[in-house]
Amino acid sequence: MKVILQNIQNKLTSEVTDLKYVDEDCGQLNMYQPPVKWPCCLIDVSAINYTHLGIHRTKIPQTRQTGKIAVKLTLANLKLTNSSGMAPQSQKDQAWFIWDLADKIHEKLHGFCPGENCTKMMRSNLQRSVRDDGVQEYFITYNFEASNV
């Protein structure tokens, strides 16, 4: 899993340059003063469901599995501008910027193969988190499978 998470991080860091902080999610946004730069994307494995493939006597462990993996990206930005209909266009553009980032992330990760023996990543879910601190936060889930794990 380490290599897969690093590959996703490297892809986002190098190809979605508007992101100022890309890291594994270890609860940074739950802190009073989150130790991140805005906008940020945090990566986590939300679930892996394993199925049995059989035995390969020359491998360790000999019992082989396929894992159905869900990776959760937390996309967050500090929203400081107004998006109302009467706001200046430059403010609206900044207020809606998180959606531009979500699109850029999707362009890079949807169909991306994060590792050896993996299928391509497919987006399956997007959820909003309601916060009271001015942070816009969305959870985006991508699914893929890894064989012979």
Image (cartoon, rainbow, N blue to C red):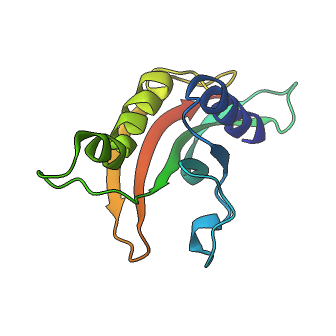
Residue 137 placement (x, y as % from top left)? 42, 59
- Residue sticking out furthest to the left: 85
- Residue in the image at 59% along x and 29% along y: 17
Splitting the image into 4 quarters, where does residue 12 fall? Answer: top right
Residue 135 placement (x, y as % from top left)? 44, 64
On screen, residue 105 above or below 76: above
Q: Is residue 5 left or right of residue 129?
A: right
Splitting the image into 4 quarters, where does residue 136 fall? Answer: bottom left
On screen, residue 47 above or below 110: below
Splitting the image into 4 quarters, where does residue 61 fall? Answer: top right
In which quadrant will I find the N terminus? top right
Foreground pick, 63 / 134 = 134
Foreground pick, 19 / 94 = 94
In which quadrant will I find the C terminus? top right
Residue 25 placement (x, y as % from top left)? 64, 57
Q: Is residue 5 left or right of residue 135?
A: right
Residue 126 placement (x, y as % from top left)? 33, 48
- Residue in the image at 40% along x and 60% along y: 80
Q: In this view, does 133 lie to the left or right of 19?
A: left
Foreground pick, 117 / 103 = 103
**Tag count:** 0
Q: Is residue 110 left or right of residue 39?
A: left
- Residue in the image at 65% along x and 44% along y: 22
Foreground pick, 93 / 48 = 93
